[in-house]
Amino acid sequence: MKKYKTEVDFCEDTTKMILGLLVGESRKIICVPEVPYGFFSNEQIDMLLLDVKNQQYLCIEYKLNGLEQLQCQVRRNNVSNIPCIGIVNTNTKIQNKYSEIFGYTGTDMQIEAIAKTIIYKKYQWRWRTIFSGLGMMYYWAYKDDENNFRGGVVGGNRIGFAAIYKQAIRNLHKEYGHLDFLITHSVLGSGYGIATSRKHYNQALQDS
């Protein structure tokens, strides 16, 4: 049975296992750790799986233990239209084909349960199009990134929502040329109000 000492190690090892499951599934996945949850929160989502080929995404929250807290985090994300599952480093009994929470200690049965959720076509409703939730902002901010598996970080030194929004603006403009504010604001769907969004838009263009 695999037991991990840190959430970072658990996140890295399990995400690599998941990426291995997705080989041959006609996806091009970029793994992005510590993704900002929203402009109104300092919280981060442990891992984003961004499928740049099919323009879909799925988020994962990891916990060594603390099943109830993990359930709250995953439920919060899904209610906010951010597709999310949770994986805990215990032998949880609650997992089933409709569950949002999965135990992982390295057993074949657990791997099969996770595979059903993220791979098999019958269950691929877990993935959402980038046109829902914060998908467009995540897509334009991270579409050219390299894989990084070091999620589950506790503490500071993480990139905030405003910085990611400005990165998305710069990448969008790099792809399509200069776009006026209202088009940019509408496309990225950050959730910011007009005044705050315009401020970040101006700053992003000044920094580019």
Image: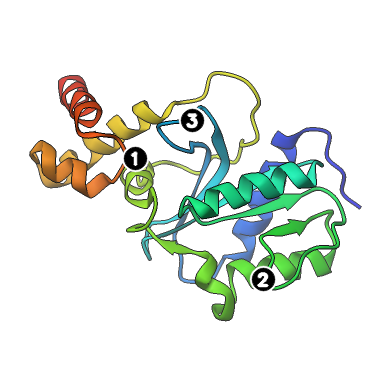
Given residues 154 and 27, the one toward you in this image is: 154
SS assignment at label 3: loop
Spatial CA span between label 3 and label 1: 18 Å
SS assignment at label 2: loop
Determine the image quadrant of residue 44.
top right
Q: Position of residue 72 (x, y in %)?
A: 66, 46
Residue in the picture at 62% in, 50% down: 74
Q: Are marks 2 and 1 in contact (CB under 8 Å)?
A: no
Question: How many numbered marks does the figure carry?
Answer: 3
Does 91 sit left or right of 207 as displayed?
Answer: right
Three-letter amino acid code at the position of disc 3: Ser
Does 139 sit left or right of 108 as displayed?
Answer: left
Spatial CA span between label 2 and label 3: 28 Å
Pointer 3 residue? 41
**Mark number displayed over residue 98:** 2
Of all residues, the one furthest to the bottom in this rendering is 122
Placement of 141 over or under 201, stated as above or below: below
Residue in the picture at 64% in, 50% down: 15
**Mark number displayed over residue 141:** 1
